[in-house]
Amino acid sequence: MNEINLDLIDTTGEPPVTEPERQYYYIAKCRELISRKSKELGRPLYSCTTTFGCQMNARDSEKLIGILEQIGYIEKETKNPDFVLYNTCTVRENANLKVYGHLGFLKKQKEKNEHMMIALCGCMMQEETVVEKIRSSYKFVDLVFGTHNIYKLAELIYDRLTLDKPVIEILKDTDNIVEELPSERKYSFKSGVNIMFGCNNFCSYCIVPYVRGRERSRKPEDIVNEIQKLVNDGVSEIMLLGQNVNSYGKNLEEEITFAELLRRVEKIEGLKRIRFMTSHPKDLSDDLIEVMKNSKKICRQLHLPLQSGSSRILKIMNRHYDKEKYINLAEKIRREIPDISLSTDIIVGFPGETEEDFKDTLDVVNRIRFDSAYTFIYSKRTGTPAAKMDDQIPKDVIKDRFDRLLATVHEISNEQTLKHVGNTYEVLVEEINEHNNELVTGRMSNGSLVHFKGCKDLIGKIVNVKLDEAKGFYYLGTMEEI
Ligand code: 5AD
Ligand code: SF4
């Protein structure tokens, strides 16, 4: 990664056919064009990337920014960038609406800056209706690509710069996992690491399997090598990323479980913390609980989406577990790893959800007492089985249930956070506090944020902090002597 000398690439001949060599060739080609443009304008060219959605998208954006920087753009939050990139999400409809809102604004910006290039990528672009709409109503967009070809950004930019017409390339699916391209990490001390792409679960409400394609796991040795390189580069915390990490390895020649991958990752010297997401309850093995329990590096945090507490709804959602199985699993995890922080996702208002079903959800929340929960109003996604179901729930009923759920979730998570006050925990310092530069902000093993007095030299270090006060979503604390 980042070790290839672009000046040594011969850009006069034909592009290589193998990856990633082909992309390095295009990076070098684009660099020539961007450098020429920059000389012409007498200033550097700026890119500005906006990321919507999940951790996978955040990681994809780091790769995209890595390519843009190699090409010669300086990534910066600026009002008038030369290259605007939106990495989109489509899991719920409001994410789509936001993008259209931004496009209206960008049109005016582009009228003021003729060099401006506008690019859209990510999950939303995998939907045919979206691309059609962009083609017909947003003709000023220069570049559209999806989730399967982000590694081709340089080649697509080159096409756009030389063909003089918008470039739209959406692949339906891919078996391709292109590694070893540049990536620009947001934090020097922590990084996401993809372990798998796509999803095979087809939960009936969810669009992800349609826009991210079938499940593909990376080889364990490639993952371990990437993490080793990151550690050599100063990273101490990694987040293993996948739509359903518990089914990691199932499609590999050498079958390997997620628990076994964790054992291998744990052995990497210099690595201090391991996180992962997301876990599907149906695939979470006893072996994984055992590995977590005995690990010194795996963080005390588990995200275990419930979605609904009603066995009837869970069946229609195609989740492959019921209320009892979920409760048993969560209780087992709490029993085996008592200091774990459990978080979850819950959807309110799935088609056909009755008051009885909703009460089952509240019941699970009250019994498991999640440390935190992300609550979502069901969003109808065209193309999913749930979108065709008759019994869509009226808005006012959903709103009422959502408010009740939120109140319960908040009350419980407030009580849960109070449990830790007065104790001392290891905290990885992440940044200077946004609102008060005498404070730093760090993260505990269980994922909670803590603000405490400190300076920028602490960033990236793990220190002991006593929690003085719980403030809802975060703590105020005091650092103990190093
Ligand atoms: N409507 C509402 N929430 C959804 N999620 C996924 N699809 C939908 C939908 N159609 C939620 C699930 C998932 C999280 C990432 O987003 O709770 O776990
Ligand atoms: Fe969507 Fe279900 Fe796959 Fe998660 S496991 S991405 S909710 S289909």
Image (cartoon, rainbow, N blue to C red):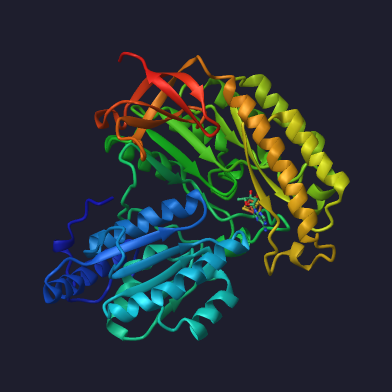
Q: Quadrant of residue 65?
A: bottom left
Tell me if 36 is positioned left or right of 127 in this view: left
Q: Nearer the viewer, residue 162 or 435?
A: 435
The answer to whether one can see residue 142 in this image is: no
Left or right: where 12 falls relative to 298 = left
Looking at the picture, how far across and down is residue 381, in whole percent? 67, 65
User: Where is residue 305 drawn, in percent x and y?
Assistant: 66, 42
Can see residue 169?
Answer: yes
Between residues 195 and 340, which one lies in front from this camera angle? 340
Please tell me whether residue 435 is drawn above or below residue 199 in the rendered image.
Answer: above
409 is higher (above) or lower (below) than 45: above
Q: Image point 31% across, 86% down: which residue?
A: 164
In this view, 253 is above or below 204: above
**Closer to the camera in the image, 118 or 232:** 118
Q: Residue at x 40, y 31 (%)?
A: 442
Height in image: 75 above or below 462? Answer: below
Q: Quadrant of residue 205?
A: bottom right
Q: Is residue 88 left or right of residue 66?
A: right
Instruction: Identify the residue shown where x is 38% and y is 62%.
Output: 151
Q: Position of residue 466 (x, y in %)?
A: 43, 17
| x and y percentages locating residue 135 in the rendered image | 49, 83
